Amino acid sequence: MRLSKLGEFGAIERIKGICRPAGRGVVVGIGDDAAVLKVPHGGMTLVSTDMLVEGVHFDLSYTPMGALGFKALTVNVSDIAAMGGRTRYYLTSIALSPDFKTEDLDSLYKGMEEAAGRFGSRMVGGDTCASTGPMVICVTVLGEPAGVKPVRRSGARPGDDIYVSGTLGESAGGLLLLKAGAGGGKQRDKGVDKSAARLMERHLMPVPRAELGAELGRAGLATSMIDISDGFSSDLMHILQTSGVGAEVEGARLPVSRGLEGVFGRKKAAALALHGGEDYELLFTAGRLKRKAIEGMGGCVRVGRVTEGGGAWLIGEDGRRVSITPKGYEHFRK
Amino acid sequence: MRLSKLGEFGAIERIKGICRPAGRGVVVGIGDDAAVLKVPHGGMTLVSTDMLVEGVHFDLSYTPMGALGFKALTVNVSDIAAMGGRTRYYLTSIALSPDFKTEDLDSLYKGMEEAAGRFGSRMVGGDTCASTGPMVICVTVLGEPAGVKPVRRSGARPGDDIYVSGTLGESAGGLLLLKAGAGGGKQRDKGVDKSAARLMERHLMPVPRAELGAELGRAGLATSMIDISDGFSSDLMHILQTSGVGAEVEGARLPVSRGLEGVFGRKKAAALALHGGEDYELLFTAGRLKRKAIEGMGGCVRVGRVTEGGGAWLIGEDGRRVSITPKGYEHFRK
C-alpha cells in the first residue's frame, strides 16, 4: 500500500501501533498538541536534534529502511551520550513522498523502536507530512545528565589525556564500499568480505556509546567530550577551539581495526581513521590522575594529550610532527 | 553570498549572531552536542515539533523569508498554547540548497527571533544541513504548563460549551488569494484590497494565541483544547474523538470577519471558516459555570456545546442540522 491511500492520520495510527506505549515520566505521549513529560526534582534536561536528508545523509539505493530508522535515532542518542547523559524520549518528524510504501514506513519505525528499546528511549511525538522531493527525517531527543552535571566540549585543560572509544574510520570505509556498489564481488577473499560487511554495517547501523557516555558523566571522569560524527580531526578541533587549547596526537595510537587495514591498506586506513566521519565513537579528555579509572572501564584508547595551545599535531613514530587539518564533512561546501 | 561559500560552520556562526543569547534556565545553549536546560522543581516539560516543507507547507514565490521564519516558530508556539502552556525554548533544524543566499538566511532567522522575542522563547540548538531538493524547516519547542496541569484534547464532557478565539477562515482565504497571485489588481475597491492584505498576512504570519492559551491553562478554565491548524471541522473532530463525545455547533455563531465576507461572499466565507486551516486560533471546551470567567477574558466566542455522542452537527438559523464532515488538509491524500 502507498501512503496516498493510507493518508496522514492512517499513517499516524500505524506509527502509534509500532511504538511501545509511553512509559515512566510520560504524562501525555503521541496524539495531542504537545507531549508532556515529568521532570525529576530540580533536574536538567538535555535536548538535541539531527536532520537526515535523502541524497545528502543517506542513499536509499543501499540503505535498508530499518537501518535508516535505527540510525536516525542513534545519531541523536550519541549526542546525548557525548554530554554524559542518558536519552529518555524522542520525537520524529518526517517528510515522505505520497508514493512511499506503508511496508517501508513500518520498517523505518521498527528500526527506530529497536534503537529506542536498546538505548532506553520512548517516542512521545512528532510530525508526519508529505515531501515534494527527498525523504527527510528529523529526530529530537530529550535526556538527562547521568551525573551532577553534563560534560561539555569546552572543559579540556592542558595536560589532560585524550581518549577515543572503539576503532575509527570504519564507517567512512563502509561508506566508500557502499558507494562503490560493494557486497558484490570486488573483494579478494572471504576474510576481506567479512571485514567489508562489518565496515558497511558500521556505516548503516552505527551503535552509539550510550553506556560509556553515561558512565563517564556519572563518574565525572571526562573534562570534555564530543561524539565523532564529522570525523576525528574535525571533532577534535571542535573541542580544542571551544576549550581554547591545543593537542598532540600519537598517530600510532589511533585505533584502526585490522579489518579496515585489510580492506583498504594501512595508509588509506590511517587517513580514514583520522578524517572519516560517522563512527559515533566518543572523543574525550580527562585528567592524568583518572587514567586507572578510565582503563578500568575498558574500551577506551589514550591517543594523546592536551597542550597549552599551538594547534593540533599528529606525532609520527619517527617523532615527526604534522599539523592536523580538519577534513571532515561540511555541509554546503562543494 | 551563497551558503556554498559560507559553509556549514560559517552559517552556524551567522545564526548564532542573529539569535539572542540564551537566558534564564539555559545551562548550555547553541554549540555543543546537546542543549542543557534547567527545569523548575518537580515540573513538567511540554515538547512539540512541526516540519515545514517547501512546496507542501509554503511557496517561496509569495512567502517572504522573514514571514516564513516567523511562522515556523509560531505554529509550534500555538501547539504549546493549546496545551495551556508557555513556550520557553526552541531548536531549529533546516535543510537548504547550497545556492541559498546568506541574506535569506539572515531574514529567515530574524523572523524566527522576532517571534521568539514576542512569545518568550530562546533558541538553544538545531541542525543545519544541505538539501538536494526543497527547503525543509523543523522546529521543536519546549515549554511548561502555565497551570498545575496541561490541557489535553481528551477532556471535553457532555454539556460543556465550545469556544473559539478570534475569527476563522481568514488564513485559508489568504492562501487562496496568494495562490491566485493576489496583491495584484483583482479586487474591486480599496476596502477589499485592505481586507485581502489582512487575509494574506494572516496566512503568512499567523499570530498564535500564546497569552490566551497560557491564561486558560493557568486558570484551569478549559476542559479540552486544540489549536486550529487543520481546520475547525477537522480539529473539532480530534477533540470529539479523543474525548468520546459529540457536538452541536451553531452555524451563525462561527466567527467570520467582514473582511473575509467582503472578499469571498457570505457562503464561501462560511465554508472557509468551517473547514479552512492554519488560523492558529484556539478551539476549546469549558463547563457552563465558567461562562462569565471566559467572557471576562475577552476574545472568545461560544459556538456550540458538547453532547453525549452522535457525531458533530452544524445547526442552521432555521434549525436544520447538517453533519459536520472534516474537510481539513490531510497529508499524502491526492
Image (spheres, coloured by chain):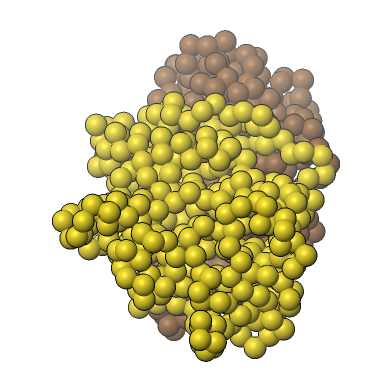
Chain colours: A brown, B yellow
* Residue shown at 64% from the left, 22% from the top: A155
Residue B314, x across and y down, in percent: 53, 81
Residue A291, x across and y down, in percent: 74, 26
Seen in the picture, residue A217 relative to B266 is either above or below; the reply is above
* Residue shown at 24% from the left, 31% from the top: B1
Which of the two residues, A146 or B259, is positioned nearer the viewer here?
B259
* Residue shown at 68% from the left, 49% from the top: B215
* Residue furthest to the front: B318
Please indicate whether residue A98 sits to the left or right of residue B315 in the image.
Answer: left
Q: Quadrant of residue B10?
A: top left
Which of the two residues, A170 or B278, is positioned nearer the viewer here?
B278
Which of the two residues, B258 or B186, is positioned nearer the viewer here?
B258
Residue B131, x across and y down, in percent: 34, 50
Q: Quadrant of residue A247?
A: top right
Residue B4, x across and y down, in percent: 27, 37
What quarter of the picture does the C terminus of chain B occupy? bottom left
Please indicate whether residue A173 sits to the left or right of residue A85 in the image.
Answer: left
Task: Look at the image and tell me whether residue A212 can be seen.
Answer: no
* Residue furthest to the left: B185
Task: Look at the image and tell me whether residue B112 can be seen.
Answer: yes
Seen in the picture, residue A125 relative to B63 is either above or below; the reply is below
Q: How many marks?
A: 0
* Residue shown at 75% from the left, 61% from the top: B290
